[in-house]
Image (tube, grey):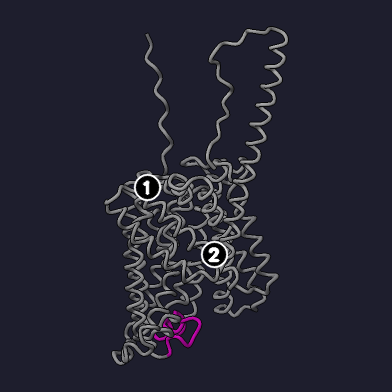
Amino acid sequence: MTSPIPAPPAPRGTLGVVQGTALYIASVLGTGLLVLPGLAAEAAGPASIVAVLAVIGLSIPLAGTFAVLAARYPDPGGVASYVRRALGGTAARMTGYWFMFGVCAGAPVVAVLGAEYVVAVAGIDRAMVPIVALAVLAPPFAANAFGVRVAGWVQFVLTALLLAVVVGVVSLAAPAVAPQNFEPFLPRGWAGVGTAISLFVWAFAGWEVGTHISGEFRDPRRAIPIGTAIALVVTGACYLVLQIITVGALGDAAGDGAVPLLDLARLGSSGFGAVAVGAIAAIVALGVMNAYLAAFSKLGASLAVNRDLPRWFSAGAESGGIPRRALALTGVVVLLYFTLMLVSGMELTPFILVHTSSMVAIYAVGMVAAVRLLRRGSAGWWMAVIAAVLCAGMLVLAVGSLLPAAVLAIAAVCVTLVRRVRRARSAAEIDESAGVKTAGADAAAPSTSTPGARAPRVDVTAD
């Protein structure tokens, strides 16, 4: 007697702690690095340092909850898959649409921000911004077309360069820090600190990106918590040190310019300043795009597997697979937003609002799902409860810009209603067909039925 052939092992991911950590850092240490230190200093003065500390503290339960979920349920659907487990198909579809078609609006914004800095530093005509932005978009798409392993190593290099440039700028400006620039500490009161906190909340968004590539880790239960913890420390330290140096070196002039990093770099070396800011802008834009595209493509493939998108896009959803079709769909969505941006005269605000409102909605629903999924009373559950309360507050703050998220939610509900109508029609056709067959059978051979026989059962699954 031959022994049964064992089933082949499930494909394992290729990302390790180093690559995963780089992707996490890039998704959080984004374009906010270019403008937020100055904006926060303008809003709260030296007390903007308190705002950074507060947001670091607020990020811990949110990032921790996503890390626990991603380690326990590695799935390319990310937050949408957790919502599906806890709240059902319709809520999961909403979450997926918010990320795929809402958060995606931020991609051309990132490219344009990077292009604006490069054009300004290089002295190129501003009419070249769209072309430079397209050039910024191309490399991340190319890297992800070869798989998340390649994208992970590319991200490692980009993140290392980013951190090196930040360290260089801080080192140049540190000797210019003056104690008198920290007085008065609360020039605009605690209301200014609140404004600075609201600014930095968006800077620390991005922890959900890792959930979509959680299946690409070799050992998710080990790598994801480690990567999240390292990213929390690194990103928090970067923003905190940069805020201290910005306030201490620039003083009241910290919020005067649109490019505070350039002002900081010029304090130590005017020649290095322009090069540094241009490099930071390009590196940040490339790094953020590279991290998000890996998430968008995996999510698109996962949505297709669950029939929330056409099944044709499902190729590459499996761990280790390359979702090139979903990546192409992401490219189409990004180009659509980019075209609308060109038509609007490069106005970024509407697209930023679409991005941020979708993020807030995802966080709120995701934390509710986490509360239901995680073991009650565990550390992860308590983090989810705290994060859910914080996200509820964020929803209140963002209520004025939630219309795009509401439209995508209505689209998800419409898909559910269409499916139910189709199933009802299919069930009616089955019943009608069974009735015709039964009538024909009764006419041809009466009394052949078996007592207690059951009618055909139609399986109706939840949406």
- Residue 419: x and y, percent? 62, 41
Image quadrant assignment for residue 62? bottom left
Alpha carbon separation for disc pair 1 and 2 = 27 Å
- Residue 109: x and y, percent? 57, 68
Q: Nearer the viewer, mark 1 or mark 2?
A: 1
Mark 2 packing: few (<14 Cα in 10 Å), some, or many (20+)? many
Above or below for 116 versus 46: above
- SS assignment at label 2: helix
In this rendered view, identify the residue nearer to me: 110 or 453.
453
In this rendered view, identify the residue nearer to me: 184 or 281.
184
Mark 1 packing: few (<14 Cα in 10 Å), some, or many (20+)? some
Q: Is residue 20 left or right of residue 312?
A: left
- SS assignment at label 1: helix
Q: Tag count in the figure?
A: 2
Q: Is 258 inside the magenta-drawn segment? A: yes
- Residue 366: x and y, percent? 43, 55
Please identify the quadrant where the N terminus is shown: top left
Which residue does the image show at 39% across and 75% down from the upper left?
A: 197
Q: Is 364 inside the magenta-drawn segment? A: no
In this rendered view, identify the residue nearer to me: 343 or 99.
99
Q: Earlier in the sequence, mark 1 or mark 2?
A: 2
Which residue does the image show at 32% across and 70% down from the upper left?
A: 237
- Residue 256: x and y, percent? 47, 88
Q: Amino acid at mark 1?
A: Leu
The region drawn magenta spans 253-271
Q: Can the viewer see residue 300 in this picture?
A: yes
- Name the residue tied to disc 1: 373
Q: Amino acid at mark 2?
A: His
Q: Main secondary structure of the magenta part?
A: helix
- Name the residue tied to disc 2: 355
Q: Can the viewer see residue 272 in this picture?
A: no
Q: Which mark is on residue 392?
A: none
